[in-house]
Image: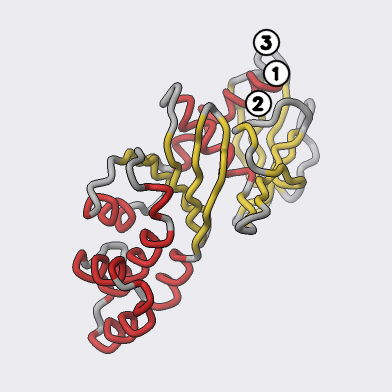
Amino acid sequence: MSDWALIGRAAEGVRVFQMQGAELIRDVIAPDGGGFLGPKVIVGEAAEELPAPILPEDGLLLPNWEQAGPPDVISGWVRLWIAGALARHEQWDGVICAMHGDLTHWILISANEAVSAQTTLTPRLIAALGGANAICPDALADTMSQPERLASHLRKAEVMGDAKALTGHLLGAELAATRPYWLGQQVLVISEKPEAQNQALEVQSVPYTTHHPEALVGAGLTALAQRLGFAA
């Protein structure tokens, strides 16, 4: 087994996973990526165009995904989460709804590849407008049926002081925009706070499974170690 480390920038600093083969030894926040044994796999310092495999074929990079149309960038950390999710759901095809920071990525997965993606700023807008981590189902339905009225729906919710309606309207607009991704699909939600997203999917009778991103990191690291030949 090889000593190696996965290193990348995160919200709290530079995060380092020190590995021995497929086993996680340490998970630390470090001033930089130095001082760790073995090869260093860097997260997000390069880009790979969609469609692309979930994990890179070789090399010491876990690149971001990029997409030309519509233009998008998805963090290499999300790739790690998805690798962990697919390790738990083998031979799984469907859609990943991954919330990373203040973005929501809808990613179509087929044959262990990310095929295409659509990303929204919904979490950022919910936070900026003072929305709740729960929805008003009627607000969701109103904006799904009339997404062109989103701005006026939001103003009404603001005047009424209805935080759940704000969230419902914003998620209604998101689901209307991403309908080709979730309609008729099974969805894996990856989120630290999935409650509102789950409620929105339930209203639409979309089958879903939820995972906390941190719960997927270990399985993702194991999959990466196997892919890069560090687990032998």
Q: Nearer the viewer, mark 2 or mark 3?
A: 3
Tell me whether the residue at label 1 lies in contact with that at label 3, contact meaning CB atoms closer than 8 angstroms: yes
Sort mark 1 into few (<14), some (14-19) or many (20+) by Cα contacts within 10 Å: some
How many numbered circles does the render carry?
A: 3
Tell me whether the residue at label 2 lies in contact with that at label 1, contact meaning CB atoms closer than 8 angstroms: yes
The residue pinned by badge 2 equals 19
Q: Is residue 188 left or right of residue 37?
A: left
Separation of residues labelled 2 and 1 (CA atoms): 9 Å
Separation of residues labelled 1 and 3 (CA atoms): 6 Å
Residue 206 versus residue 125: which sits nearer the camera? Answer: 206
Residue 123 image offset from top left, x and y in percent: 44, 64
Q: Nearer the viewer, mark 2 or mark 1?
A: 1
Q: Name the image quarter holding the N terminus.
A: top right
Q: Which mark is residue 50?
A: none
Q: Which residue type does callout 2 highlight? A: Met
Considering only vertical position in the picture, is 206 above or below 25?
A: below
Residue 62 versus residue 151: which sits nearer the camera? Answer: 151
The residue at the point 62 percent across, 49 percent down is: 75
Residue 135 image offset from top left, x and y in percent: 25, 64
Q: Name the image quarter holding the C terminus.
A: top right
The residue pinned by badge 1 equals 230
Q: Is residue 25 left or right of residue 94?
A: right
The residue at the point 48 percent across, 50 percent down is: 106
The residue pinned by badge 3 equals 232
* Residue 6 quadrant: top right
Q: Which residue type does callout 3 highlight? A: Ala
